[in-house]
Image: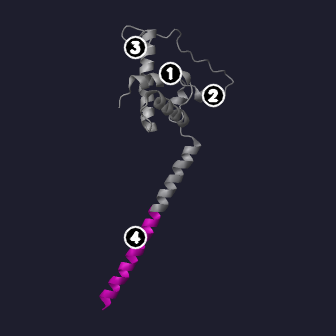
Amino acid sequence: MTVDDNVKKIILGKLREWEGETITVAKLGELREIITKKTGKHKFVPYTNIRKWVREAKKDYVAAAKAEKGAGPEKGGRAPASEPHHIPAIPKHAGPMVVAMQPNSDSMKKSMISPFSDRVYFQNLTYELSAMRRGLERISKQLDDLEEQLKELGGK
């Protein structure tokens, strides 16, 4: 569903007004009322359609803003960084957790499982084993019943 130019202008005006704020259901209702008053249509348009219109208008707005600023490098890629990314040095008195949290440290390369995930993993294994045990007990009981029935039929 494409957006009319009039509706898109209304939405863009509200987006500029609500810059940096999240768009709630109340704002969508307000937007629907404004669109209905100014255009005379779309009185009962669902919020999902309004959200789609907002996304489309926002996409056009961002594209226009990028075009005004300029595309940056010739090939349209990212502009070169003015400063290289610098990771601060780790103090010698830092504990093992601080060292482990650094992105370039050797300890991060090893796969680490937290004690909580270990506990959850073992708990899941325990549940699986107990389910298997219940299944085996059920099968064992059925086998016992079948043996009794065979004995009864064989004895007659």
Q: Are marks 2 and 3 in contact (CB under 8 Å)?
A: no
- First of labels 2, 3 by sequence position: 3
Q: Closer to the observer: label 2 or label 3?
A: 3
Residue occupied by mark 3 = 77
Q: Secondary structure at mark 1?
A: helix
Quadrant in the picture for the C terminus: bottom left
Question: Mark 3: few, some, or many residues within 10 Å (few <14, many ≥20)?
Answer: few
Residue occupied by mark 1 = 13
- First of labels 4, 1 by sequence position: 1
Q: Is residue 122 magenta?
A: no
Front-most of residues 142 and 22 = 22
Query: Which amino acid type is shown beneath numbered disc 1?
Result: Gly
> Picture coordinates of residue 45 (x, y %)?
43, 37
Q: How many marks?
A: 4
Region of the chain picked out in magenta, as a range: 132-156
Q: Are marks 4 and 2 in contact (CB under 8 Å)?
A: no
Q: Closer to the observer: label 1 or label 2?
A: 1
Residue occupied by mark 4 = 139
- First of labels 3, 4 by sequence position: 3
Residue occupied by mark 2 = 98
Q: Is residue 93 above or below residue 47?
A: above
Query: Which amino acid type is shown beneath numbered disc 2?
Result: Val
